[in-house]
Image (tube, rainbow, N blue to C red):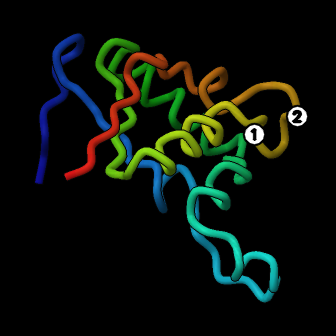
């Protein structure tokens, strides 16, 4: 399938769960007791992931690149925290700072 990119018009929406953030199986007994919102709020994206998203932002444009996530309110709040946590490999900058995705282009839905 080939899709034609139209600069300034084509739009891209990136999911968070298992795309930007990754659920991992772990032997850590603390991870078993934490719910999704707690795990998400403490998670950190990798710098490589944020830089890859920055390349997509450059390709599609800031106004046309979105994060779209289906989740309820608690996980929405945790996702905001995740997107603003320092990324792994860069203890100062967040996923949003590195990727260039506009905070107003973060969209949550529940259905």
- Residue 4 % position (x, y): 13, 32
- Picture residue at 65% right of the left edge, 20% below the top: 97
Q: Quadrant of residue 32?
A: bottom right
- Tell me: 1 left or right of 28: left
Of 46 and 107, nearer the camera is 107
- Tell me: 30 left or right of 104: right
What is the residue that sits farthest to the front in this orientation? Answer: 74
Of 60 and 66, nearer the camera is 66
Q: Quadrant of residue 34?
A: bottom right
- Residue 103 % position (x, y): 48, 19
Give the distance between the C-alpha atoms of the residues marked 1 and 2, in whole angstroms: 6 Å
- Residue 98 % position (x, y): 65, 25
In the picture, the quarter occupied by the N terminus is: bottom left
- Picture residue at 72% right of the left edge, 48% below the top: 44
- Picture residue at 84% right of the left edge, 35% below the top: 90
Image marks 1 and 2: residues in contact by CB distance under 8 Å: no
What is the residue that sits farthest to the right in this orientation? Answer: 91
Give the labeled residue for mark 1. 87
Q: Residues within 10 Å of mark 1 (few under 14, many from 20)?
A: many
Q: Secondary structure at mark 2?
A: loop
- Picture residue at 78% right of the left edge, 88% below the top: 27
User: Of the numbered discs in the image, which one, if any, rests on residue 91?
Assistant: 2
Q: How many marks?
A: 2
Q: Secondary structure at mark 1?
A: loop
Of 24 and 28, nearer the camera is 28
**In this picture, is 68 found above or below 16?**
above
Q: Residues within 10 Å of mark 2 (few under 14, many from 20)?
A: few
- Tell me: 50 left or right of 87: left
**In this picture, is 82 found above or below 40?**
above
């Amino acid at each position: 399938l080939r899709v034609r990119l139209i600069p300034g018009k084509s739009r891209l929406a990136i999911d968070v769960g298992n795309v930007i953030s990754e659920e991992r199986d772990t032997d850590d007994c603390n991870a078993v007791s934490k719910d999704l919102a707690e795990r998400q709020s403490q998670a950190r994206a990798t710098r490589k992931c944020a830089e890859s998203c920055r390349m997509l932002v450059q390709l599609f444009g800031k106004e046309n690149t979105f994060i779209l996530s289906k989740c309820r309110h608690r996980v929405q709040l945790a996702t905001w925290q995740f997107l603003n946590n320092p990324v792994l490999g860069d203890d100062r900058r967040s996923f949003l700072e590195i990727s260039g995705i506009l905070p107003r282009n973060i969209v949550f839905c529940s259905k």
